[in-house]
Image: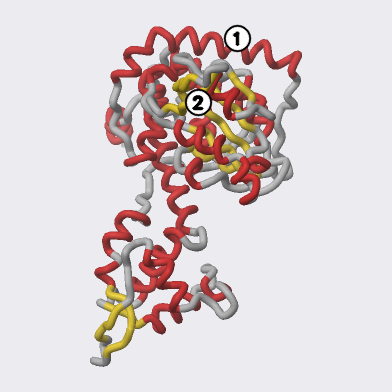
Amino acid sequence: MPALADQLAEEAVPDPEPTYGSELLDELRAQIAQFVILPTQQALDAVTLWVAATHLQPAWQHAPRLAVVGPAKRCGKSRLLDVLTETVHEPMLTINTTPAAVFRSITDEPPTLLVDEADTIFGTPKQAEKNEEMRGLLNAGHQRNRYVTRVVGNDHTPHRFATFAMAALAGIGDLPDTIMDRSVVIRMRRRAEGESVKPFRSRRDIPGLHDLRDRIAAWARPLLDEAADLEPGMPVEDRAADTWEPLVIVADLAAGHWPGRASEACARMVAAEIEAEEDQPGEARILADIRRVFVSQREVDSLSTDELLHHLRQNAESPWAEWGRNGLSARELAAMLRRYDIKPGNVRLADGTQRKGYMRNKFLDAWRRYCPTVHSVNAESAAPASG
């Protein structure tokens, strides 16, 4: 047995050596956790990396949004924004700020936009319509070299304004899809009985947060060119990879245990958002539920419309039984699927008869594109983060 213990000790991978950068991130993580309870350890890691990434904005091709959302009041959203305000690069609070004032404030060294109570901006169709210019600015500013043109001065000279800047938005309920799709999403929860945080006191706590902010900025600035040149391997693809890349690069620059933490946070949190998207009525939810029906029917080649609707309505966890007056109809199903270029047709059933229905192979491309399989991550459980 002693020999086996010695062998296991030799095979064990040692913890990465801490670096100055990793120690700064550890300190920032601990400071955030003092004041706010994040939903998971991965969410706490993501917020930490996002804050550090604001100090390297000129290096990034994409400016990730941080969407801090919760189902109700008193979930810690505003308190997290308080901490972000004192630790990010050049915070710009956008309360009662017009879009024109915002994009006139964005330069080659952009500020970090902070939007509290975003639900009052985008929460209803009327509010969203009124604030369409702000949403357009936030969407365009996710990618470098996206500009807005406005006339200025008495002679109305056209002038091009930059939009590129990192932004954090906090609000009740989900933000518009176009913003959520460009965001690292933090889904806050109200503190449970027994969970406690340190009260935030400006006079006492802000000096220490500013000192940490300045040390992170001093560490990051000499790494600007290196950060711009890095192209890390990403555990996700497409827009999710664009959004998370600055956080992963910051972790690689800090080294220590942070590259592993960043990769785990990215994989887990993106997978969670894919699952959340599938749970929403309409959109990819109908595709995911139809895929489950075909799987439950042993991957048959086709199903009649009536049979498919029957199985969709039988799913107690889905909204289709209560959809409309009498449950999801054939017409409504066809309308939902038309946007994915999937149409009903004559199909031959197992008993040899022909009826209107859907071929399984017509869904394959849409399933692959809009509801990819969520792969599990071999990592520690996503336990709530605590202070």
Callout 1: helix, strand or loop?
helix
Give whichever of 272, 153 is nearer the camera: 153
Q: Horizontally, is 7 left or right of 75 in the view? A: left
| Residue 152 visible in rendering | yes
- Colour convention: secondary structure
Number of numbered discs present?
2
Which amino acid type is marked by label 2?
Answer: Arg
| Residue 26 visible in rendering | no
Q: Is residue 105 above or below residue 303?
A: above
Residue 260 x, y percent position in the rendering: 38, 31
Give whichever of 11, 270 is nearer the camera: 270
Which amino acid type is marked by label 1?
Answer: Asp
Residue 307 x, y percent position in the rendering: 39, 83
Residue 246 x, y percent position in the rendering: 40, 26
Q: Quadrant of residue 386?
A: top right
- Image point 52% across, 68% down: which residue? 318
Tag on residue 150? 2
Tell me the residue that label 1 is attached to: 211
- Image point 65% across, 43% down: which residue? 119
- Image point 64% across, 49% down: which residue? 126
